[in-house]
Amino acid sequence: MTAPVRPEELAEWLSEKPSSIGDGLLMLSSVLLGRAGVVENGRFALDELADTVAEPTTSSIIDALFSSGGFQGDVENYHAEDNSFLDRVIERRLGMPITLSAVVVEVGARVGVPLSLVGIPGHVIVGTETANHFIDAFGGIEVNSRWVQKRFESIYGPQAMIPSSAMQKMDVEATVNRVCNNLMRSWADDRSDKMGRLLDLRSLLPASPAERSLLIEVATGRGRFDIAARLREANNPDDPEIDALWSRLN
């Protein structure tokens, strides 16, 4: 692409239910950072990583990426924005669970090992086609269901049980949404254009009523009354604040 991806382009692409998590996250980087060539360069980098995998097994993927390739979880600056951008994660070999897991899934697809993202509350892991077999990309290790449950308990308490619905595969749209939500928190005090682009994109994607309420609050606080009005209308077409917000644009 000769120009950065626009929010509308990514939203339209996601509506077509694509299968490439890598492309989705690379397009997200292009949108939010305003950079061209991110998708093409990122695909090439993932191809190069796949070339380092000795054989089509999860163990070989882990060895190539983590033991030999140097990928690791960023424990010192977990919420750094670079950890949310797939292209930067590939360059730096540092990331958070969701982006590191995306690297694993994309490399797996290239070497013929079907893998998927599994978004348990508070963490993201990689699912395999074998029951009770997962990859924790943040730690660069293979794990089982007991490990996953213990990880969940470490966040929510010893009596907490993972909902069965949480162990389902994440599609591309859900993955992009989750990264966007992470950045909404990381950029809460950011006044730059990138936060404006994030609001533009996030307002075009599916959201729960609670997520819309947060977006409305953020958009209103930043003077994006157009976004706030559209989101209020999505929540409640009869909301009396809608007209007032539109009038503030005049």
Image (cartoon, rainbow, N blue to C red):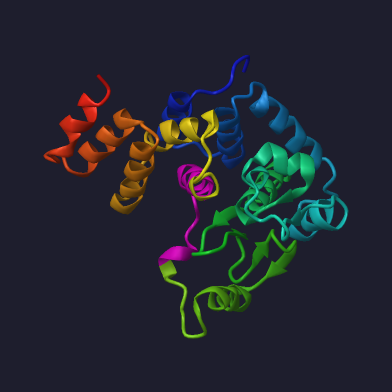
- Tell me the quadrant of the picture where the N terminus can be found: top right
Comparing 145 with 249, the one in front is: 249
- x and y percent of residue 136 in the render? 67, 63
Q: Is residue 16 visible?
A: no
Is 171 included in the stretch rendered in magenta? Answer: yes
- The number of numbered badges drawn on the structure is 0
Task: Place residue 23 in its image quadrant.
Answer: top right
How far from the left and from the top, in percent, is residue 24?
Answer: 55, 36
Instruction: Examine the rendered structure and indicate whether residue 177 appears above or below residue 142.
Output: above
Range covered by the magenta-colored residues: 165-183
Query: Is residue 195 visible from the viewing direction of this image?
Result: yes
Give coordinates of residue 41: x percent, y percent: 72, 27
**Magenta-drawn stretch, dominant element (helix, strand or loop):** helix
In the depicted structure, whether residue 30 falls above or below residue 129: above
Q: Position of residue 63 (x, y in %)?
A: 83, 57
Residue at 85% in and 58% down: 67
In the image, residue 57 lies in the stretch drawn in magenta: no
Residue furthest toward the top? 2
Q: Is residue 138 left or right of residue 93?
A: left
Question: Front-most of 148 and 37?
Answer: 37
Location of residue 129 (image quadrant): bottom right
| In-image side of 77 versus 60 (left or right) | left
